[in-house]
Image: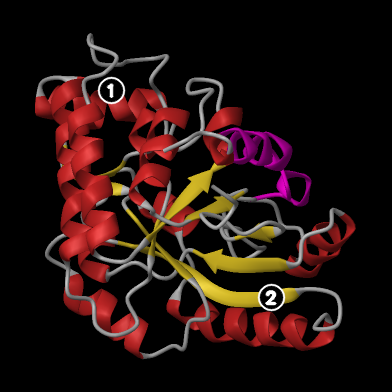
Amino acid sequence: MGHEFFQKGRDGHTHTHFCKHGSEENAELYIIEAIKKGFQQYSFTEHPPLPFELTQTIPNGQWLVDELAMSMNELKDYFKIGKELKDKYQEKIDILVGLEVDFISGMESFTRDLLDSHELEDGLLSVHFLPGKDGWRCVDFSAEDFQDGLVKYYGSVEKVYDAYYEMVEESIEANLGPNKPSRIGHLTLIHKYQDFVRPKDPNYDREHITKILSKVKQSGMELDVNLAGLFQPMCKEIYPPIWVIEEAVKLGVPLVYGSDSHKVEHVGRGYDYFIEIMNQLAMKPF
C-alpha cells in the first residue's frame, strides 16, 4: 500500500486571530510559519457564528459564547482576509478558506443557511455541544464543567460518550445541503478529559466508533487526524487514537492531518509523528 490514504504537506484544520479562545496573532503569521515548515497546502477552518437559539441556552454566560465563535459581523472580514492571503502567497502555498462548522441537532436550518451563504474551499463538521445541565454544554470547555454539566446530567461518563457519538452519527447523516463539509472533525474530542474521568472499560466506545467509521466511508467523507489531543494534559492522545486511524485506513477513509492551531507556535505540531504513523500503516498488508 502506498500513501494514497493521505496527502503529505497539508494542514486541514487551523484557526486564526478571529478565534477568541486562541491567540491574537494575525492569520498571516500562521501562513508564514506554515511556509517555513514546508507545508504546501493550508486550510483556514475558523469557528463560524453559532445559532442564537444555542447561545441563549449556554448556561456559562455570554462571555463563553463570545469566546467560542465569530460573530456574524466578523464573518465577512474573515473571508476577505483569507482571500487576500490566498492571493498574496499563491506562489508559495495553496491556502483554502473554510470553516469548522458545528453540528447542533435541531438547528440544521441555521447551518444550511450559513453554508449556502458562503463558498467554502474546505471545511470540517464537528460536534462541540451536547444537551446538558441547564442547557447546552460545550464538551471541551473544562474538566470541571464536563463533570458537572455533562457527567452528572447523563449519570455516567459512558452515557456522555454515547450521546456524543450519537450526535456525530447524526451529523454524518444530516441533510445540510450541497455545501456540507466533507470531513469529520476530531472524532474523539470527547476523550479530552479522559485522565480526569473516563469509562471503566477502556474499549467502551470501540464498537460505536467502528460503526461511525463505516458511515463516514459510506458517505464519502474524510477524517480529521487531529494532533491537538496529544498536547492536552488530560488526554495525551490523537483525536482519534491510532487504532481508529488503522481501521479508517482498512476501510479506505481518506485522512487529513490537522494541527488545530490556535497559536502560531501550534502550526505543524505533531506532524512528524503523524507522518511516522502513516509510514507504518503504509507498510501493513491490509
Q: Main secondary structure of the magenta part?
A: helix
Q: Is residue 140 visible?
A: no
Residue bearing the label numbered 2: 95
- Select label 2 or label 1 by which is in front: 2
Residue in view at x 54 percent, y 86 percent: 76
Residue in view at x 67 percent, y 41 percent: 275
In this rendering, would 128 be left or right of 112?
right
Magenta stretch, residue numbers: 262-280
Q: Residue 229 in the image: x percent, y percent?
A: 52, 33
In this rendering, would 230 be left or right of 156?
right
Q: Residue 224 in the image: x percent, y percent?
A: 47, 52
User: Does residue 230 sit above or below 104 in this rendering?
Assistant: above
Identified by mark 1, the residue type is Gln
User: Does residue 217 sit above or below 162 in this rendering?
Assistant: below
Residue in view at x 33 percent, y 39 percent: 139
How many angstroms separate mark 2 from mark 1 (CA)? 39 Å
> SS of the residue at dot 1?
helix
**Tag on residue 147?**
1
Furthest toward the right, the residue is: 36
Identified by mark 2, the residue type is Ile
Residue in view at x 44 percent, y 30 percent: 241
Q: Residue 182 in the image: x percent, y percent?
A: 38, 68
Of marks 2 and 1, which one's residue comes earlier in the chain? 2
Neighbor class of circle 1 (other Cα within 10 Å; few <14, some 14-19, many 20+) is some
Neighbor class of circle 2 (other Cα within 10 Å; few <14, some 14-19, many 20+) is many
In this rendering, would 233 be left or right of 240?
right
Count of numbered badges drawn on the protein: 2
On whether residue 278 falls in the magenta region, the answer is: yes
On whether residue 48 falls in the magenta region, the answer is: no
In this rendering, would 80 be left or right of 1?
right
> SS of the residue at dot 2?
strand
Tell me where residue 43 sits by quadrant. bottom right
